Image (cartoon, grey):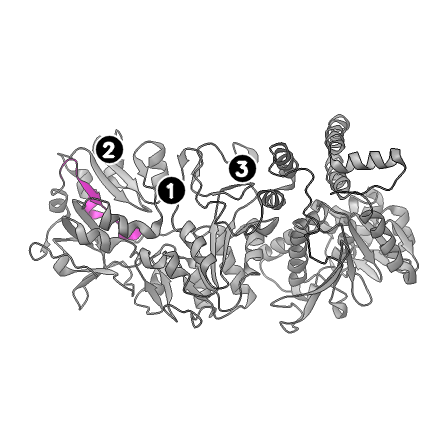
Amino acid sequence: MTMRPAGAPAQNITSEQAAGLVTSGMWLDYGVALCQPEQFDAALAARADRPLNVKIRTCLTMTPRATIESDPDGRHFHLFSWHFSGYERRQHDCGHCHYIPLNLGEVPDYYRRFIDPVDIAVIRACPIDRDGYFNFGVANLWHRAVIERAKTVIVEVTPSLPYAHGDQNGVHVSEVDYIIDGGNSPLATLPNPPPTEIDRQVARRIAAEVEERSCLQIGIGGMPNAVCTLLLESGIRSLGVHTEMLTDGILALYQGGRIDGAAKTLNRGKIVYTFALGSNQLYAAVDRNPDFHCCPVDYTNAPHIIMRNDRVVSINNTTQIDLQGQAASESDGHRHISGTGGQLQFVRGAYASNQGKSFICLSSTYEKRGERRSRIVFNLTPGNVVTTPRSDVMYVVTEYGMVNLKGKSVAERAKAIIRLAHPDFREGLEEQAYQHRLIPRGVSFDVPAGRDHGSTVRNIQMNTIANGSGASDVILVRENRHGVVKLTLNRPKQLNALCESMLDALQKEMDAIAADANVRCVVIAGAGKSFCAGHDLLEMRGKADEGYYKALFDRCGRLMQSIQALPVPVIARVHGIATAAGCQLVGACDLAIAADTARFAVSGINVGLFCSTPSVALSRNVSAKRAFDMLVTGRFIDASTAADWGLINEAVAESELDAAIDRKTGEIVSKSAAAVRYGKAMFYRQKHMELGPAYEYASDVMARNMMDEDASEGIDAFLSKRPAVWKR
């Protein structure tokens, strides 16, 4: 560590005297987040003879700057920020704050090699310790690099700052020119709102990819923090942390006993970070706690250091991504929002790590001026800054699925990313992709050369099972046979009740199938004596939080919608009973074939619970009066009645059930995959339109279908009286 010798022993002066050292044209450095000075800034703003054109470097300013608030015309003070907070974003919008492009982990080198020595560095720090150091608290970053070459160094002593153990996390009194009193005001906090259901849906996919002994980097935002919540609930242990930002989500994992750092190569047993922002509980937990290790940012963020830990998992947000995989995470056109931060460096470091993974996550849509818009786009918004290039992006995750882009061609990327978009935008994105040749016509990715897609069976295991079974219990069985995926619910002792783990397993499979062009049809079946007895009431009983039930039913509803959103038909194979959410599952499937001994009911009313969510699927299959009768009586109907009412397609002898399913899937697989995909999306969308718009939309789809190679082949084959050979 390079030490800066001060010209004379440090002097204690007032904040007003310190502010008097500033002259016009100077560059000041305020440091980052909680280290930014408060008393000095207020005194500088209050000077009667305020200097002109003073430029102040900042980063993540958490409280209003008195200098900026006192200078609405911008004649005296301007902020230059390495990463925007909400406050800096607002000041940028009115021309008072300007962004400095970077990779965050490179900033110490910028100060040492490229930036002229700052005129005055003013850093807020803890009171002097017994070794003569003023500790930087929970913000290390590049403060040492600034101080090494600064012309003048001022420390604003603030007892309320937490004392953070770490490397190079302080300045010695021999390096300091002036010391001022920073008071003991409360520290700025960063709100940590509860995750939304979309946050949890995205987080659930990422959490399923995190193995024990992984080393985490958690970015800022609701989705990365939601991953921490899901990991805490999953029971996974022996995690490590090497991150840029220390968050409340990481603290929850630490306090829950999930983090021990035992598998780390570097700083074994330590939670390594370069700054912390969050709640007062976070600051209190870090204070003088040797488990937390605050390091310079060129150590935490350098890819060649990150990669030295095994199984690094990097999780970061983006705001927009195009069909080639370019992630724009920091601007909205030419309006700057945040910054590059460490996203790109952690993406690269995680990829280079042994068994490492990096995830870029986003919600599929957002609201702007009352209009829903897609975050997945054909072209990025003009002016948008690419934070992570397409060549670096690994996993992309939305509430509709997850895809690994590594090794994929532009066409494969476009097809995969379109499946992550909201269903309302997929058709338009696909049309643009074909029009501009991102997806070429005449090329199929359905059957890669040398790969056998004949028949495989895969057991899906969950970390926790609601019925108390062991962690290795098979809760869902997937069979792949010549383009047909069969998903068998495998809780026969509980009549295949939909526990939370079952819902998660089904949702994960739906997302995987949506992104797999090899799948032509899906069959959902139940093991044992019955199809599905609905939600697991034993698991649900006694929860005191209404939010738990809302989240549970939202998850189930989204699963049902995912079935309809799949581009391939889904068939329910029903035997025994299908009750409540089990009946809902039958109604959500595109087709249903049942044994003649099967029975159906929405029986929640019998236990004091109206089957509200099952009623959505039920009422879309049978008439209103018949549906309401089932809902208010809870009575069973037999398979013959279910077929007459339209809940299922047909009832067959139980001994003939599998043969009937095979016939139906065979008929579907023999048809053009492209035509089926066009048709399913069109069929459900037009049902909600008025007659005129429905015909107009259907005409558009049919015209587009006519331009498809399979349509040309099918018509030629029909006229030539030969079997068609489908290309897609």
Q: Secondary structure at mark 1?
A: helix
Answer whether residue 558 is magenta in the image. Answer: no
Q: Could you say where residue 81 lies in the image, as x and y percent from the top left?
A: 31, 42
Query: Sequence-wise, which precedes: disc 2 or disc 1?
Result: 2
Q: Which residue is mark 3?
A: 367
Q: Could you say where residue 684 lies in the image, as x and y percent from the top left?
A: 75, 39
Residue at the far left in the pictured view: 8
Q: CA distance from mark 3 to mark 2?
A: 34 Å
How crowded pointer 2 is (Cα within 10 Å; few <14, some 14-19, many 20+) is rated as: some
Q: Quadrant of residue 95?
A: top left
Q: Quadrant of residue 54?
A: top left
Q: Which residue is mark 1?
A: 86
The amino acid type of the residue labelled 2 equals: Asp
Q: Is residue 607 visible?
A: yes
Query: Sequence-wise, which precedes: disc 3 or disc 2?
Result: 2
Q: Residue at x 27, y 39 (%)?
A: 79
Residue 71: mark in rendering: 2
Q: Which residues are magenta?
A: 23-42
Closer to the camera in the image, 711 or 186? 711
Answer whether residue 41 is magenta in the image. Answer: yes
Q: Residue at x 38, y 59 (%)?
A: 304
The amino acid type of the residue labelled 3 equals: Glu
How crowded pointer 1 is (Cα within 10 Å; few <14, some 14-19, many 20+) is rated as: some
Closer to the camera in the image, 302 or 558? 302
